[in-house]
Amino acid sequence: MLLSCLSPRGTGTQTCTPVVIEMSGSKILMIDTPGFEDSARPNWDILDDISRTLVAQHLFDVQLKGIIYIQPITDDRVTGGQTTTFEIMQRICGLRAFESVLLVTSRWSSTQRSEDKQFKKEGVLMNKYWAKMLAAGATMSRFYDSTDSAIALVSQLLRQESVVVDLQRELMGGQQTLKKTQAGEYVMKTDNRKASRSHDVRSEVEKALKTLAPNWKVAVARGVPFVVCFTQFLLSLLGVPVPWAIC
Amino acid sequence: MWTPEVHLVLVGFLDSQVIKISSNHRSFRRTTASECIAILNRQAQMCTRHARAVTGQAAVAHVRLDRTGPHRIMAPKSKVLSTLQGGLGLAKANELPMVLVMGMTGAGKSHFINKLANRHVVEEGDDYDSCTSQDCALKLIFITGRRVGLQKSQY
């Protein structure tokens, strides 16, 4: 399951990591978000990262094709953490974006004994936990742990129209701060503490854009493609130092 | 308000009594979801009867509800971009699709992306053992098989 690790310890994704994938000739920007309910980072920080990414994406008119929500099929029951994560995701998307959500079960194993359990768990997810979202147009699929399967899943989303999620609508419209968004309110409740960082995500992103625009222009002039510039901008937004002049 | 447009495809076989229903729910408004399902159910019964009439053959029904308006409400745009216009290569922006991968910690999000890229591009965590040391995330960005960015981040 675990591929060779570059770092000395097994580390989860620390912040939103943009990855550019080339698939049948066209480029796709995949955002690997940090998992909610992580012992190392409060949900609030993770939501903050995701909101910056989404605001930047909307600002630049990059096409959000959808959201892949992954849940392992291996556990016997749905944990509290999984429920919280699912609830946060629902609030980020909003009802109108449910049809752009792909609910994916992962870690299917092929042993006969585990299969029965997995089917049962899948049924529970379908009929209970995910029922509302599926009825609202979300799609449920399996990830068979192969490149072909991953490509098939992403292709499903690429065929669709792009989507604007509720979190973007809330943050881009008027003076809404992250605290006041549906997802923000929910996360504040679950974290059970006051959020410390500044929350006017939109003006933060715009400020960063003004600051980084000169670097960006130099990079474009040197022939760095837009997708790379945008990726670097995302990383800068999330506090990751970026070598802008790469080419 | 927007478009509850429902396509229902129903395939019934009398002999094996296998009835497969797949529907493509374009959109459901919260208040109309139950109505839509009720319509689907009625349609499904009707189709089943029809399928019986043409034993062994597939019956396909399409249900289409009235379009009542655009179902995607756009968020307002920012003015900052227009003041910075030029030199940012923005013409390419709307050709770039983005997909967000979410899930609980340990769900296998990074693993999914590594499988998609067919190589090791993002760090994967141990199952359910979130990292406590925050100092070592190597980020690699690949484009057309060429490594264009590699940085060690200090978060």
Image (spheres, helix red, strand yellow):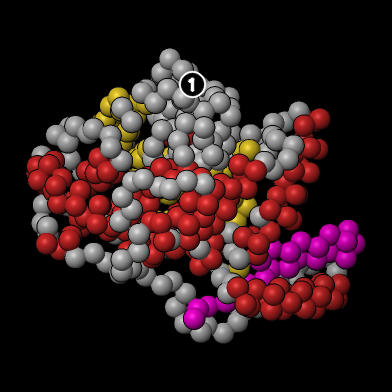
Q: Is residue B119 left or right of residue A215?
A: right
Left or right of B52 in this view: A5: left
Q: Residues within 10 Å of mark 1 (few under 14, many from 20)?
A: many
- Front residue of A77/A98: it is A77
Horizontally, residue A53 falls left or right of residue A185, namely left
Give the residue at the far top of this rendering: A8
Q: Range of the magenta residues?
A: B1-24
- Residue at 25%, 40% (x, y): give it: A236
Q: Is residue A62 magenta?
A: no
Badge 1 is on which residue? A10
Q: Is residue A102 visible?
A: no
Measured as percent of width and height from the top left, residue A88 is found at 53, 52
**Residue B114 position within the rendered picture, expressed as x and y whole percent measured from the top left:** 46, 32
Is B76 above or below relative to A152?
Answer: below
Nearest the viewer among B146 and B154 is B154
Q: Secondary structure at mark 1?
A: loop
Dominant SS type (magenta)? strand
